[in-house]
Amino acid sequence: MTRRQSPVTAVRDDASSSRSALLRPARSVGSGAGRLDLDRIVRSIEEVLTVFVADKVSGSRAEEPGLEAVLDAVGDFISAPGKRIRPLMCVLGWYAAGGTSPVPPVSVLRVAACLEIFHAFALMHDDVMDGSDQRRGRPSLHRTLAAHHPSHPRADRLGVNAAILAGDLVLVWSDELLTSTPMTPEQIKAVLPVVYRMRREIVTGQYLDLVTTGRPTDSLSTALRIARYKTAQYTVEGPLQIGAALAGADQSLLHVLSTIALPLGEAFQLRDDLLGTFGDPRRTGKPTLDDLREGKHTALLACALRRADRAGQKLLLRTVGAADLDAHTASRIQGLLEECGARQAVEDLIQERHHQALERLNHAHLPATAAFALRDLIQAVHNRTA
């Protein structure tokens, strides 16, 4: 019998596509004097990720027989094309705090890779909580695991429970990669508090997301608070500060990076809100009906409830969050979001945060390599379509 190829070998093949959705608008990052070769850096992160995950999968296969289906699914999930924005932000934080080598040292790459593994854990649990069928254009992990047991009387429930356990396993892997990375006592003292705060904040954001889902209101402040906790701090601020802490950044620099990161991260989430309703599923990897069916309390929905007339408000309150929402009704909602100005209002919020991030970057006096890369990434986040 031929042994199944290790799923994590796909990481190398997908390295370019995994970051293309974010970095294609910023190809100039990799050329010219004083600019970083982000393609090369991301490939280095992918290599660390590949080796580590392959080792964990093969080791667990040998030590824990019976987990093959879970391990294969986890390996496929981590290796699937993704933006890799968190590890990239970690590396840029290291450069912002004075890192100079063309490719960061292995210790920085390992910490950056551990953030991508932690992100995989978060996505696995997020898909369970949201009941999402797809992730990155593929079946979500709980659907994949359920499909491994088609004859089981409660296959769907089994898939959900197995995905929770798989997420827990991946969280352990993230910790293993972090704590096995050679760091000085000073680096450990600086990095771990930022890691722990980032993790607390994503739990806070996820909880706020859960308790507001299906209960739409016109509270824009609540929607933006969720965006800050769930995305801005976890996706941009935390990773940037972790990388900077590795390079010995002081509190003043960490604060400067935060002032750039938070509007950038909020813009990232606001763009997600728009793509979740108006994006091309072939590019986003998720159906456009998901957010509307789940009734997520997004800035887009809050703006719509503020701007729509009474009939429009009734339509939104009656249909958004309905599990049986069909394509025709979704089209009506999309039309309403356009007509009442909600879509443009969110575009305006994105533009405002885009300008804030650029203005704060311009006054930050960061090393040229980090400043060039962050400026291009800010533009890429603003223009992204997936």
Image (cartoon, rainbow, N blue to C red):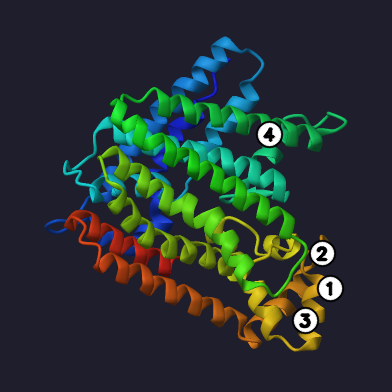
Observer-nearest of 59 and 110: 110
Residue type at tag 4: Ile
- Residue ID at (77%, 65%): 215
**Label total for image:** 4
Residue type at tag 1: Arg
Asked where in the image residue 287 lies, by quadrant, the reply is: bottom right
User: Which tag, 4 or 1, sits closer to the chain's start?
Assistant: 4
Q: Is residue 80 visible?
A: no
- Residue ID at (31%, 49%): 251
Asked where in the image residue 323 lies, by quadrant, the reply is: bottom right
Query: Looking at the image, which residue sits at the far front?
Result: 251
Asked where in the image residue 182 lies, by quadrant, the reply is: top left
| Cβ atoms at labels 2 and 1 below 8 Å apart | yes
| Cβ atoms at labels 2 and 3 below 8 Å apart | no
Query: Looking at the image, which residue sits at the far top?
Result: 63
Residue type at tag 3: Gln
Q: Which residue is mark 1?
A: 318
Q: CA distance from mark 4 to mark 3?
A: 37 Å
Q: Residue 80, image x and y in percent?
A: 50, 42
Left of 365 or right of it: where is 218? right
CA neighbours of label 3 inside 10 A, class few (<14), some (14 to 19), many (20+): some
Q: Residue 135, image x and y in percent?
A: 60, 49
Q: Which residue is mark 4?
A: 164
Left of 382 or right of it: where is 138? right
- Residue ID at (77%, 29%): 149
Element under disc 4: helix
Q: Which residue is mark 2?
A: 322
